Image: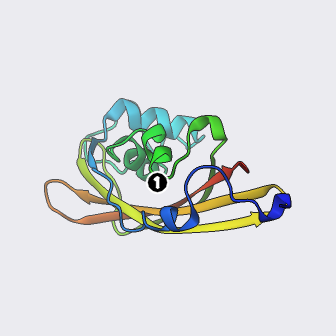
Amino acid sequence: MSETAREPAGMSADDVAARIGRAFPGGEFTVERWFAWLLADAALAGPETSTPGGPVGEPAHPLLAWTAATQAMGVTWDELFSWFGSSADDGPMFGEHETVWHAPMRVGRTYLVSGEVTSADRKSGRSGVFDVIGYVFRLHDKESGAHVADCWNSLILPRRLS
């Protein structure tokens, strides 16, 4: 059998696709003042965006949505990879990301995170066989219930041939 005709080791394409709709356990994330400041500083945002002594309620840097979502998704990265018969040793890669904002995140507020797997596609290319896994996280203000942001993401999971 030629290399291109061989099945990759691990889960079949149907097994991977069966994970579509699987929910993340989720959790909550509180925007601590120090964390918001460090993130803004790392992103080279000016002091007007977030200051170390800034008041509770000031807007946090937009990068915080993805950070909050992945901190409160309710599983570790290795657990997420294992849902698809993969591990960190297989060389997973971050694919695409898009955040859609409905309201700003604010320092001192707590956000509820929920989400699920939205797509799973087996593909092949010059680098071999891989799966593209799509997933979304939704953030809601814990106190008001307001929908704050959606973070759409994809993972690339390389598959080794058996």
Residue 86: x and y, percent? 56, 45
Residue plotted at (31% across, 41% down): 31
Q: Nearer the viewer, residue 18 or 79?
A: 18
| Residue 21 image-quadrant placement | bottom left
Residue plotted at (71% across, 48% down): 160
| Residue 90 image-quadrant placement | top right
Looking at the image, residue 20 sits to the left or right of residue 129; the answer is left
Above-or-below relation of 105 to 47? below
Residue 68 in sight from this viewpoint? yes
Looking at the image, residue 66 sits to the left or right of residue 26; the answer is right
Residue 156: x and y, percent? 63, 55
Q: Nearer the viewer, residue 80 or 36?
A: 80
Local SS, label 1: loop
Q: How is the image coloured?
A: rainbow
Residue plotted at (13% across, 54% down): 143
Extreme residue in the front direction: 1
Q: Which residue is mark 1?
A: 62
Q: Quadrant of the N terminus?
A: bottom right
| Residue 20 image-quadrant placement | bottom left
Amino acid identity at mark 1: Pro
Above-or-below relation of 31 to 96? above
Residue 108: x and y, percent? 24, 41
Residue 71: x and y, percent? 38, 41
